Image (cartoon, rainbow, N blue to C red):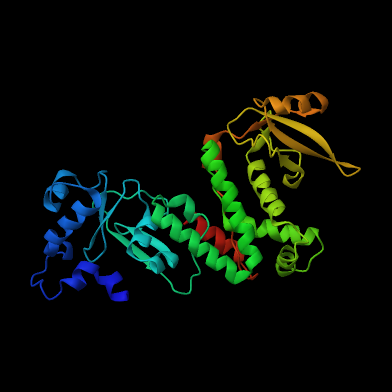
Amino acid sequence: MNEINELGLARCRYAKRATDNSPAWWACLEGQSEELRDRWKFAEGLRTFLGKFDLGAHSNPVYVFTPRGEIHFLPDGSTPPDFAYHVHTQLGHHATRIWVNGTARPYQFPLMNGDIVRVEYDTRFLGPELFWLDCAITPSARAKIRRGLTARWKSIHPSRARIADLVLKIIRNYERESGYKFYLAEHRLDAFLLRLARARGLRDLNELYEQVAQATLMQEKIAQRFIAEELGRALVQADGSPLGFPLYRISFCQHCHPFPGQPLIALKHRVGKATQGLTIHRRDNPGCLGTASRSPQVELHWLDASVAKSCSEICVTGLDRHHLLGDVLDAIYD
């Protein structure tokens, strides 16, 4: 597999046939033409197709190259994870960095015609990452990422896999019903589960997972609570200032399923004897209007989408040592 990834499939297959220094894909145009016609239903050959679209332009499919010259065809809008999983599943799982035309690019970078893509991988890296689902667009790559995530989560604990699978199911339901797209980072799920374990007086996450396995703690409620906190991050007060309520005291109606961009109603409710929480409803849902007339309201708005997209979150994990913060800031500024 290493030879194929480094030299290219066409180079390995046609090594005996190629006698000059031409790129590997150029030595086997006829075979690639047949694949192009079979997969993408083109009547013309590969030479005609390549001559029709300029380098750096978009087409459907786009054609990209490995560093050794092997050509790959991907749907327009494909990203580096799509390319890595197209080459090999394990190459995708262990990808640590992607270089496009000699420059390190983020995973969501859109590939264009003629791009030379190099995948830097490490077999010790336990991928894939949850946010890769937001980057990949091809059904094949997304399916491989989901299977890889499930396998990795099961290796941690079966209950961890069930919780995370439920989170992904809720996210897919939001995307299918409302078109709203979540951008999740796995470290936030880890931090949420750890807070939950500490709030219940548990020593570590393993005790939390055991309670889920024994049905002492419902995995559905955990997944819904996590999604509620993620949605709560997009709420601000009327003047644009942050919320005055902790995220764990905010819940979202399970009947109207409000999501960012929709008109909302925020209603106060009692949590225990001395604290208050908020329940978020959709303003255009008739079933929630009766509840709104009986409960005090709080003026809240969704965070502006342009502001939300410009925000970044950086999570750093490391052993405490002298000058650690300075070294981290130097890396960020560089």
For residue 65, side relative to residue 323 (left or right): left
Judge whether 288 appears above or below 320 on screen.
above
Residue situated in front as seen by the camera: 87 or 319 = 87
Residue situated in front as seen by the camera: 267 or 146 = 146
Judge whether 181 appears above or below 7 on screen.
above
For residue 129, side relative to residue 16 (left or right): right
Q: How many marks?
A: 0
Residue 294 x %, y %:
82, 26
For residue 214, which quarter of the picture? bottom right
Residue 116 x %, y %:
27, 58
Residue situated in front as seen by the camera: 179 or 331 = 179
Instruction: Tell me which residue sits at (24%, 68%) in the image.
Output: 8
Judge whether 278 appears above or below 230 on screen.
above
Residue situated in front as seen by the camera: 212 or 190 = 212
Instruction: Tell me which residue sits at (67%, 45%) in the image.
Output: 228
Quarter the N terminus occupies: bottom left
Is any part of residue 101 visible from this angle? yes
Is any part of residue 105 visible from this angle? no
Farthest residue toward the left?
A: 19
For residue 86, which quarter of the picture? bottom left
For residue 318, side relative to residue 51 (left or right): right
Instruction: Tell me which residue sits at (90%, 42%) in the image.
Output: 274
For residue 21, which quarter of the picture? bottom left
Residue 300 x %, y %:
69, 31
Residue 12 x %, y %:
21, 73
